[in-house]
Amino acid sequence: MSQTAESAGIREGESCRPSLAAAWLAVAVALSACGSGNGGEPPPDTTVRSTPVAAIEIRPRDLSRSVSLSATVEPRVVVRLAARTPGAVEEVLVEEGAAVVAGQVLARLDMSEALAELARARAQEHSARLDYQRATDLRRRGMLSVAQHEAARVALQVAESEQALWRTRVEFGRISSPLDAIVTARQIEPGEAVQEHATLFELASLDDLVVRFGVSELDVVHLGAGQKMRLSLDALPELELHGTVRRIAPVANATSRLVTVEVALQSDARLRGVRPGFLARTRIELDPRPDALGVPAHAVGRNDASGGPDGSGFVFVIENGVLTRRTVMTGVTRGEWTEILAGLQAGEQVLASNPIEMRDGQPVRVVEMRP
C-alpha cells in the first residue's frame, strides 16, 4: 500500500511541473509582446512644431532726418559810426540804449579850424564871382578877350570848389545817424580827442532781427532761401517764433567748416519781447520722408554675399504661420528704422528679429506684436 501511494505521489508531482512551466512561458510571451515595436520606446511624435517669434506690422512712418541748431539773436543791420576827421569831442547827445532816427545828430566835434577855412573860402568865392561878372560885362562890350573871360570863369569854379570842400569838412564834425536804430554802444565822452576812422558809436536796427546758425556742409544742401522754420527762446520758453531762411552763405567757414544760414525772425519779434543776445533754438527737418514704409533695421538681411544689387536686402514675411523670404529694396536708415522702397506693402507682418537664423518656409507662431 505504501509503495503504491508513494508511486502515486511521484507521478502527481511530475504532472504539476509541466503546468508551472507553461505558466511562466505565457508570462514571457506577454512581456515580449508588450515590449515589441521600437526596441521598447514609444512611437515618434510626428506633430510639426512652430517657432515662437516677434512680429511687426508694416505701416508708414516719419523717417525724415532732423538737426537741432542754436545761436543768438542778432540785429541784421549793425552800423559802426566812425570819425571822418580828427578832432576833439565837443558834445555827446545820446546814451546807450537811446532810440534815434535817421539824420539825428549824436555828437559834435570841435571844428573851429574848419569853420575859419570855410569863411575864408566863402570870401574868395565872393571875390571870384565879382571878377567873373566884371569880365562878362567887358567881354559883352568887346573890351576883353575870350581867354581872359575864360580865366575868370575858371577862377570862380576853383573858389566854389574850395568852399564846398570846407563846408564838407565842417559837416564831418556832426556825427549823425544814418538810419532809425538803437544806440548799442557809445565809445566817446566830451573832451576826448578822436582820430580819423575811430569808432564812435554802434547802432542796430532792432526791427529787423535775425539768427545766424552754423550748419554742417552735409546738412546745408537740404536748405534753401525762403524755407520756413519754428524757433524757441530760452529766455521766453512759452513764446513760439517763426522764421524764414533769408540767405545762405556762399562758402563754409575755413576753420569750423560750418556754413552760415541766416534766418529772419517775424517782423513783430521785438514787440513780443525778443532782444539781441537771446539764445534761439530750432529743429530743422532735412530730407523729409513723412510717409515712408519702415522696418526695424536689424530685421533686414543683406543680399551682398549673393551678389544682389546695391540697396537690396530681404525680410521674412509671416503668411499663414509660415516664414516667406521676400526680397526688398531699402532706402535710408534713420536710427533703428530702415526705409523700404519696394517689396512690401502696408499691413503686412514681418519678422521683427534678426533673420539670419531663420529659413524660408519655417513654421512660426507670433507671440509678440511689437509697436
Image (cartoon, rainbow, N blue to C red):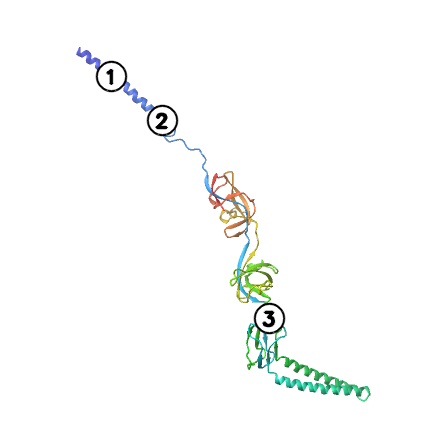
Instruction: Report helix, strand or loop for mark 1.
Output: helix
**In the image, residue 91 lies at what x, y percent?**
58, 80
- Residue 148 visible in the snapshot: no
Instruction: Report helix, strand or loop for mark 3.
Output: strand
What is the three-letter code of the residue carrying label 1? Glu
Residue located beneath label 1 in the image: 14
C-alpha distance separating marks 3 and 2: 109 Å
Residue farthest along the left direction in this orientation: 2
What is the three-letter code of the residue carrying label 3? Ala
**In the image, residue 188 lies at what x, y percent?**
55, 78
Residue located beneath label 2 in the image: 34
Residue located beneath label 3 in the image: 181
Please give the count of numbered marks on the rendered protein.
3
Residue farthest along the top direction in this orientation: 1
Answer few, some or many: residues within 10 Å of disc 1's Cα (few below 14, many 20 plus, some between 14 and 19): few
C-alpha distance separating marks 1 and 2: 32 Å
Which is nearer the N-term, disc 3 or disc 2?
A: 2
Answer few, some or many: residues within 10 Å of disc 2's Cα (few below 14, many 20 plus, some between 14 and 19): few
- In front of the other: label 1 or label 3? 3
